[in-house]
Amino acid sequence: MMDAWAANWQMAVTAAVVVGTLLGLLFIQRAPDMIMFGGVVVLMLTGILGPAEALQGMANEGMISVAALFIVAAGVERTGALAVIVERVLGRPRSLSAAQFRTMVGPGIVSAFMNNTPVVALLVPAIREWARKNRLSVSKLLMPMNSAVVLGGLCTLIGTSTNVIVAGLVEDRIGAGLERPWGVLDLTWAGIPAAWGGLREFTGPLGMFDITWLGVPLFIVGIVYGLTASRFLLKDRRPAVSRSDDPRQYSLEMVVEQGSGLVGRTIEAAGLRHLDGLFLMEIDRDDTVIAAVSPSERLQAGDRLVFVGVIDSVVELQKVRGLRPATEQVFKLDDPRSERRLIEAVVSPTCPLVGRTIREGNFRSTYGAVVIAVARDGERLRMKIGDITLEPGDTLLLEAGPAFLERQRTSRHFYLVSELQDAAAPRHDRAWIACTILAGMVLAVALDLLPMVVAALAACGLMLATRCLSSTEARRAIEWESLLLIAGSFGVAQAMQKTGLATAIAEATVAAAGNNPLLVLAAIYFVTMITTELLSNNAAAVLSFPIAWQTAEQLGVHPLPFVMAITVAASCGFGTPIGYQTNLMIYGPGGYKFTDYIRYGGPLNLIVMALTIALAPLIWPL
């Protein structure tokens, strides 16, 4: 009696914590990771979870894989390879719908043959940067992309870890004595050979493309939903003050390098027109000034391009391959360019170079830094950088080694000396190394040579060893809020399993459906979907599988429609940020709130559920 009372008490407390955590995520707009860990702390204080159980998510392979993948993605981005890949694959869309289509279809197809976690980890920083360059709302792109990637993973057996786990559970059941074969939809009437999925016996484990018959329609519907529903259900989460509102207007000169890919391309094709917060004022070509530059103007080697724009845009221009600062002084600095930083410094009245031009004052020799751009009270400075006469209050954008910050941080010559984050020049010479490491990681996982966590950690180590990025940059690349949210969700999931709350919810829901196979199928799908929104996709599949299999046997129907239903339901948790691992990965970068997942993902959950319940019994007759 005491044991039963204790079990019921623990189940009730766990249910209260789950509800409280969800309400906190729904109504409190800040620190979702702290809300999740607050729930975990309550479970520890009440004795429902021990410290090891509560914190097991910190050592979970999935979470560690995601952390390593953030670093791998940063390495590809730091070398400039990611920008090149994204520019060629995604291009320059003419509308938001075109941009959404490009970010959904390609990644969705890739995720059918590759675990969707690395796909999302690599795409998030790329799409965020691409959206910024094309003046698109990243919140309108990341959630549709994520849903397409998840649904694309349902098109093959290896698309998600959930598919593989369910296939293993099916194989265990067959080995335990399942002798009755089951058939799949007879499509020979449509001219489709039986070997491609027509009527046949199925006595072995799930095959590579068995789920494809259901996955492809779901993927197509997901694309259509993303293109239409996102217009009304997703809010533009861009900040009210854009970076183009910055009052500081920098003047900047860049030169087109000999042999670069920009030579011969038009201004439009080179992506130098319609830059956010940046204006190409003129081109200096062989001492001839071309003003009011036409978008059809073709670039030539040695062209000096004069830009005016805000700091973020100026920084991005430094990363364009084939352009370099026009001043030759950058080649005379002692530090390797890969170790230099971009620094903002405001000239003080006590600076000894005030009243002299940058060239006359020998700025590089005096300070060990090179002036890249100058901002002065919103003015457009129309002279070359070296000819600008310094005045108090001028804001300088400098390229300098790490020692400059230490020397000048307390100097009276400058005010507000600060390093710009993520502003270092790309290490283009290592782009091929980063791409090779990335390709090796993907192949190792796709060919099942290494587990995801091992491949990701190995790729992470190689990125650091080959200096594709520094250890400091690696630490900055990790989205700690997302990782803590993932780790905390594992603790809550463990409590739901340990107290029997998850199983009790599942059994009660199925019992309420009665003996109608379709109603029972819908009930099992629904309870699996709710479970994956609260636990994890793999936990939901493992919990629901025995219930689904046993129910099918009791009803005297084939278990395969039920197996496929829980496979889809376990992966398709779009209604909460904790419903699926990749949901958490886009939470911070997309600027989303909990309500965005309910508003956009809730209807998608119901659409996928309805389509699965309608198609599964047709493809695999009951």
Image: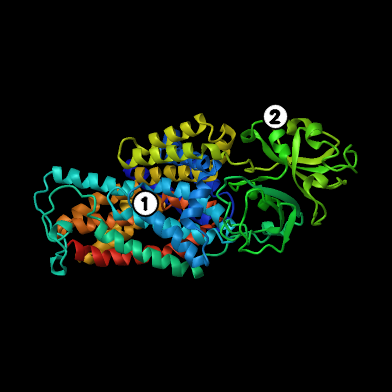
Foreground tag (2 vs 1): 2
Query: Relative to residue 88, is residue 367 drawn left or right?
Result: right
Can residue 127 be seen in the rendering of this structure?
A: yes
Residue under numbered circle 1: 111
- Residue under the point 46% across and 45% down: 486
Say which amino acid is labelled 1: Ser
What is the x, y in percent for residue 198? 15, 61
Q: Nearer the viewer, residue 246 or 22?
A: 246
Q: Which numbered tag is attached to residue 403?
A: none
- Residue under the point 59% across and 47% down: 322
What is the x, y in percent for residue 83? 53, 49
Query: Relative to residue 206, is residue 69 drawn left or right?
Result: right
Q: Quadrant of the C terminus?
A: bottom left
- Residue under the point 33% across and 46% down: 161
What is the x, y in percent for residue 235? 55, 65
What is the x, y in percent for residue 229? 45, 69
SS type, badge 1: helix
Q: Nearer the viewer, residue 132 or 21?
A: 132
Q: Nearer the viewer, residue 398 or 312?
A: 398
Query: Relative to residue 322, is residue 454 drawn left or right?
Result: left
Q: How many marks?
A: 2
Q: Quadrant of the N terminus?
A: top left
Mark found first going from the N terminus, 2 or 1: 1
Quarter residue 238 falls in? bottom right
Say which amino acid is labelled 2: Asp
Q: Are marks 2 and 1 in contact (CB under 8 Å)?
A: no
Q: Which numbered tag is attached to residue 334?
A: 2
SS type, badge 2: loop
Q: Residues within 10 Å of mark 1 (few under 14, many from 20)?
A: many
Can residue 585 be seen in the rendering of this structure?
A: no
Does 164 sit above or below residue 569? above
Q: Residues within 10 Å of mark 2 (few under 14, many from 20)?
A: few
